[in-house]
Image (tube, rainbow, N blue to C red):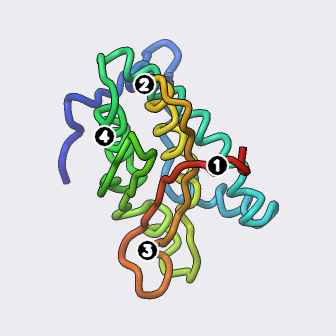
Amino acid sequence: MTKMAPELPIEVDSETGVWTTDALPMLYVPRHFFINNHVAVEQALGIENYAEILYQAGYKSAWHWCEKEAELHGLEGESVFEHYMTRLSQRGWGLFITEDIDLDAGTAQVRLEHSAFVYQQGKVGHKVDYMFTGWFAGAMDQILGARGSALRTVAEQIQSAAEPGCDVGRFQVSPRSQSAG
């Protein structure tokens, strides 16, 4: 087991008990607790409805996070996306690897290894990592907006390690069609 990297400090306020990382308040909960709640909401709303809600919320959160981190660390372009993938990977969701990114084209491919969802749920025969999908489009669109580009993107999970014959998750970011708005 490795120890927490010093570049990702967790600070705990001794008076309030609030945990902070990257100047953001954090919650520290067991993986099974989070996943059990996630699955309960999924069952209540249906996967498609829940996935859409998570996409929109994740998109907005990723945009905000990338904007603040880019400003704080003086990052721009692909460096913002890579910083985001690194931080996500350091927080226990899984390991996010950017396989390809082209800001001019508005495309990216992300591979997910060691997904927390797959670790908890196993090979269930369908995609279980959809919570992350909006994160990639939100990050990409923030970067594009900061560059002055009007191009906007959409992300899609194209495979999950929870599916038969798959060992990793894969996500594709591509330009949003004009008809999609």
User: Residue at image x 48%, y 23%?
Assistant: 148
Task: Locate residue 50, reporting x and y percent.
Answer: 73, 56
Nearer-N-terminus badge (3/4): 4
| Amino acid at circle 1 | Tyr
- Residue 97 in the figure: left or right of residue 60: left
Residue 144 marker: none
From the image, tell me which residue sits under label 4.
82
Q: Are marks 3 and 4 in contact (CB under 8 Å)?
A: no
From the image, tell me which residue sits under label 1.
55
Nearer-N-terminus badge (2/3): 2
Residue nearest the observer in this picture, 8 or 147 = 147
User: Residue at image x 57%, y 40%?
Assistant: 152
Which element type, helix, strand or loop, lies under badge 1? Answer: helix
The residues bearing labels 4 and 2 have C-alpha atoms spaced at a distance of 16 Å
From the image, tell me which residue sits under label 3.
161
The residues bearing labels 1 and 2 have C-alpha atoms spaced at a distance of 23 Å
Crowding at mark 3 (Cα within 10 Å: few <14, some 14-19, many 20+): many
Q: Are marks 2 and 3 in contact (CB under 8 Å)?
A: no
The residues bearing labels 3 and 1 have C-alpha atoms spaced at a distance of 19 Å
Q: Are marks 3 and 1 in contact (CB under 8 Å)?
A: no
Task: Locate residue 64, reporting x and y percent.
Answer: 53, 26
Residue nearest the observer in this picture, 5 or 79 = 79
Looking at the rendered image, the quarter that the C terminus falls into is top right
- Residue 166 in the figure: left or right of residue 125: left
Q: Nearer the viewer, mark 1 or mark 2?
A: 2
Q: Are marks 4 and 2 in contact (CB under 8 Å)?
A: no
